Image (tube, helix red, strand yellow):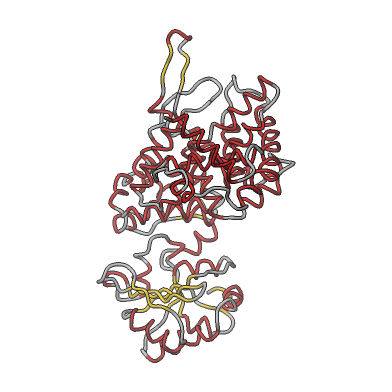
Amino acid sequence: MVSETKIRDRLEDYPQGLLDSLLQTADSMTVVLYISGGALRDWLMGNSSNDLDFTINYGSVEFLEQVRKRYGSGTIVPLGMRHDDTCRLVLDGLSVDVSGFRRGSATIREDLSKRDFTVNALSADFKEVLEQGGEIEIIDPMHGIEDLQNKTIRSCPGAFSDDPLRMLRAFRFAALLGFEVVPETLSAIAARANLIGLSAAERIRYELEQIMMSPRAYPAFMGMNAVGLIEWVLPELYEGHGVSQPSFHHLDVLQHNLFTLDCLERIIANPKDFFPDRHRVVDQYLSDVNSLVAIKWAALFHDAGKPATRDVLPDKDNRITFHGHDEEGRQKFVELTERLKWSRTNRDRVSRLIAMHMHPFHLCNSLRTEGVLSERAQLKICRKAGADLVGLFLIAMADCLAGQGEDKVDTIEDELAALFDIVETINREKVIPVLAGPKLLTGHDLIDTLGVSPGPQFREILDAVDLAVIEGKVGDKEAALDLVRNILAEKD
């Protein structure tokens, strides 16, 4: 028995008409409607849930069709395979999932014992939740409330044999809830890690995306690596295992990539500590969850190209080099996204950041050795990074923090922060106004006026025009056309 206070408060988050429709449908079909799984777990933790999870003995589609008819809104979406008795009603900002008892279960307790984790194997009679005063009985055959109180993730018997994807899901819940996976569950995952490949690529991608959206992606990926999942889920990343680096690093390539994600999450939590003069710009950039997730992926994979490009130079005291690792890393990430069926937009954004991750360091080196940085160099990095200029410097700062070898330049973090101040100013004052304004030339001008055939060179030419406008070298259409004529003449 638990106090109903937390749950009663949470019910106020949902339309009363929907709650009434659910209860009326259960009465008309003479079924017991159980609130179960993640929604009840979140309520018991005092949190809201955008998903309502219910269990009945059988007939999820018919049940939700009646709910929709009574409530007068929503879209029915079947879930799982055709033979699965599970269905979803999608409403504005809310989804209602209903499942029949799992795999021949005769009771709710038997159904709960076949769930993934004990903290999700909780249930309560929804009618009692809505109508009961005082205390509510929580059906808890797997002792999930105890694990909820201890903030632990523990698998139910046979969980990973039934669905190997649950091995990834253990780390997703740990990351989202801030819980720890218990040693017995970690051992069970380690013994079956190679089976994760039986799961559909789209399902694997979803779990990884959820982990990256949490503020604790680093411990999740470290845990996945400890039990052998990284080797099977992200083999392109795992190639860095045991690959040594020069003395300005203190970790192998795999551990450095992982540690860079940790450092990035620390920067995200407190941008002012690392970019004191530009932290508001950083906060604004990070307010977009897509940007936040993109830079986390780029940080995790920024050096994934090093194993394939590693070379040792005997004539230079066995110096270790990784020439071209940025472009090789971009290609490695593209291979991953093709396998996991990412959208092209997300793939291109992250892969561009990986390919550019060394650019801030090149500028820092130039500024350190020459004492000055040309405006053209500043403009080029702003133009190439585009809307992800902030993200590029966040990744660079995390990369710096993650390298703690004895030959590391002591002032590099301060140099990066100072460089960001410079380029962010020129980006805000010169680049953004030009790019946001009307274009002097378009692709049609290249075709109609200059007879240029459509192709990849279009982007290169138009970028050159934009850069010339930003530099003040071109101010009207005719001057822009003359510039393009010169570019084309040099190519001939």
Count every numbered label the image shows and give the total: 0
Question: Would residue 478 be visible to someone looking at this image?
Answer: yes
Instruction: Give the answer, above or below, for where 20 lies relative to 470.
Output: below
Question: Would residue 139 be visible to someone looking at this image?
Answer: no
As drawn, is 281 to the left or to the right of 183? right
From the viewer's side, name the closer residue of 156 and 338: 338
Q: Which residue of the protein is positioned furthest toward the right in this rendering?
A: 277
Q: Residue at x 63, y 27 (%)?
A: 364
Q: Which residue of the protein is positioned furthest toward the top in this rendering?
A: 315
Instruction: Give the answer, above or below, for where 444 lies relative to 310.
Output: below
Q: Residue at x 46, y 43 (%)?
A: 450
Quadrant occupied by the C terminus: top left
Q: Residue at x 37, y 83 (%)?
A: 63
Q: Quadrant of residue 279 in the image? A: top right
Residue 312 position, x and y percent, is 42, 16
Residue 114 position, x and y percent, is 34, 65
From the viewer's side, name the closer residue of 293 and 21: 293
Q: Residue at x 47, y 87 (%)?
A: 71
Residue 246 position, x and y percent, is 50, 20
Q: Quadrant of residue 16 in the image? A: bottom right
As drawn, is 118 to the left or to the right of 357? left
Residue 242 position, x and y percent, is 41, 27
Instruction: Give the answer, above or below, for where 248 lies relative to 335.
Output: above
Q: Which residue of the protein is positioned furthest toward the bottom in this rendering?
A: 28
